[in-house]
Image (tube, helix red, strand yellow):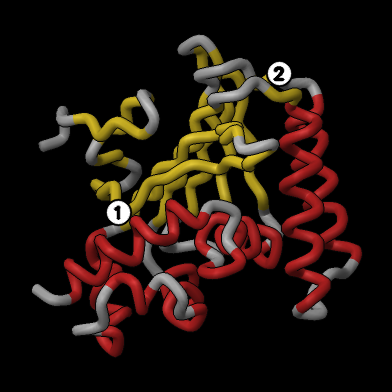
Amino acid sequence: MGSEMVMVDEHPFPQQITTTKALSLMGHGLTDVEIHFLQIKFTAIGVYLDPEIVVHLKQWKGKPGNVLATDDDFFEAVASAPVAKFFRIVVIKEIKGSQYGGLLESAVRDRLAAEDKYEEEEEEGLEKIVEFFQSKYCKSKSVITFHFPATSNTAEIAFSTEGKEDAKMVVENGNVAQMIKKWYLGGTSGVSPSTITSLANNLSEKLSK
């Protein structure tokens, strides 16, 4: 099982990733935009979750994937469930690290501001992330990962390009870490609708067992 790959737009994603325990690929998709009828693809995304997450989602048992995909309360529960989560982002269209960092910063800042959680500590936390990506160049096939441990409200970010692990950082601000989660797991406001649909379908299937 562990060696099988799932292809997401020609990019291989392992079925499982082991952090402190094995996490399963529960959803995948793309970030893209349509310009003059052309689909421009930016990144391929794999969302890995501890299979135990279904224990925390029982109230949605029996709901079909298309219903879950538009249920923001469901994705709030997915993001908040006290289990390990891991996002693997593969760059398709190369982008400066400063551009990626800027996108992440504005998405997270907007979410924090909407919930009235944007204070000095959060601003500092976001500045560190922007600084981390500032010097990076995200070539095609570079990999960005976010690991959210079950036991702490932090996020570990790693960046690697051309197979070499380049750098790591820890986001210690819990509010910032939570909003990065919601950038990718935000239901109808998530950055990748195809990933949300994939997650909703897979979790619906797992909940029906």
Q: Quadrant of the N terminus?
A: top left
Residue 137 image label: 2
As drawn, is 100 to the left or to the right of 1? right
The quadrant where residue 117 appears: bottom right
Extreme residue in the bottom direction: 59
Residue drawn 19% across and 75% down? Answer: 207
Q: Tell me if residue 34 comes above or below residue 196 in the rendering.
A: above
Residue under circle 1?
26
Q: Amino acid at mark 2?
A: Tyr
Residue drawn 48% across and 83% down? Answer: 73
Q: Tell me if residue 124 comes above or below residue 170 in the rendering.
A: below
Q: Tell me if residue 96 comes above or below residue 116 in the rendering.
A: above
- Label 1 Cα neighbours within 10 Å, binned few <14 / some 14-19 / many ≥20: many
Residue drawn 50% across and 19% down? Answer: 141
Secondary structure beneath label 1 = strand
Extreme residue in the front direction: 37
| 161 vs 127, nearest the viewer | 161
| 80 vs 42, nearest the viewer | 42
Q: Quadrant of the C terminus?
A: bottom left
